[in-house]
Amino acid sequence: MKTLLSALLACALSGAPALAACVTVAPGLPGWERLDFDDIPSNTWREEGGALVASSSASASMLYARTPATAAPVLSWRWRVDRAVPATDLTRKGGDDRSLALTVGFAYDPANASLGERMRRVMVETVAGADAPGRIVDFVWGGAHPVGTRFESPYSGSASRTVILQSATAPTGQWATERVDLSSLYRELWGSDMPPVTQVAVFIDTDDTGVTGEGRVADICLSAD
């Protein structure tokens, strides 16, 4: 089962090296770790011209990196889709493929966690360690939803939110630059101050539609303004 939150929780077990606030993509992808899903073929990943290139063919997996815990509120990056995935309903389990996604993991904040999150936390820490993220935001290029749509993950509920930044029909082969005030967004989504960012991940997903997709991400950076 594809569960972005569960996948990020597993990152805590892997010992991936921490990266600087601006996450670089160097030849050989040092500092990045691959995370596969059970019983689903894996994507392929490579570096090209300073960008992380994700290729997917009836497959799904993610590449992730830890960042030093930071309260830097502004996240920026560039991304491009070269082969788009058909529009899918990302609010339901199964059939929820997407062209590209950038996922941000936040430190667990017990003071503002919901009852359900607190109840699950013991199990999460037992499996993934005390530094596993508590919540995530999944910024998506794709899906059958208008740009700006926000919703809870059908897999992880209130601990994981999806934000549509580019539609499935956005032009391919063209770079788009994103800049998100994570602090403001976090307060809008969960009603509390943003805890430190601890992880970022790149995800592409075509196992349900069975198509071939490709995209790239570059210049991921967390900054104060």
Image (tube, helix red, strand yellow):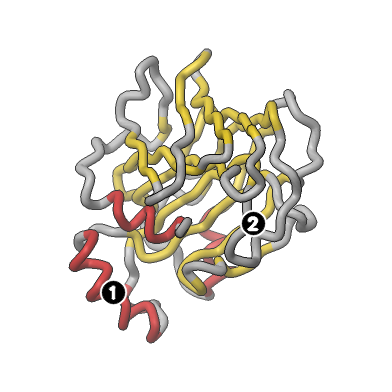
Disc 2: which residue? 95
Residue occupying image coordinates x 42% and y 33%: 22
Residue 178 x, y percent position in the rendering: 64, 39
Residue 90 x, y percent position in the rendering: 65, 59
Residue occupying image coordinates x 36% and y 56%: 196
Residue occupying image coordinates x 42% and y 24%: 25
Residue 88 position (above or below residue 219): below
Q: Residue furthest bottom?
A: 115
Residue 158 visible in the current orientation: yes
Residue nearest the observer in this picture, 130 or 195: 130
Residue nearest the observer in this picture, 131 or 215: 215
Image quarter of residue 35: top left
Residue 54 x, y percent position in the rendering: 53, 30
The kind of residue tagged 1 is Arg
On the picture, is 29 further left or further right than 101? left
**Residues at badges 1 and 2 in contact (C-beta under 8 Å)?**
no
How packed is label 1: few (under 14 Cα within 10 Å), some, or many (20 or more)? many
Q: Quadrant of the N terminus?
A: bottom left
Residue 64 x, y percent position in the rendering: 39, 40
Disc 1: which residue? 121
Residue occupying image coordinates x 24% and y 58%: 131
Labelled disc at residue 207:
none
On the picture, is 139 further left or further right than 164? left
Residue nearest the observer in this picture, 213 or 148: 213
Residue 162 position (above or below residue 30): below
User: Which element carries disc 1, helix, strand or loop?
Assistant: helix
The kind of residue tagged 2 is Gly
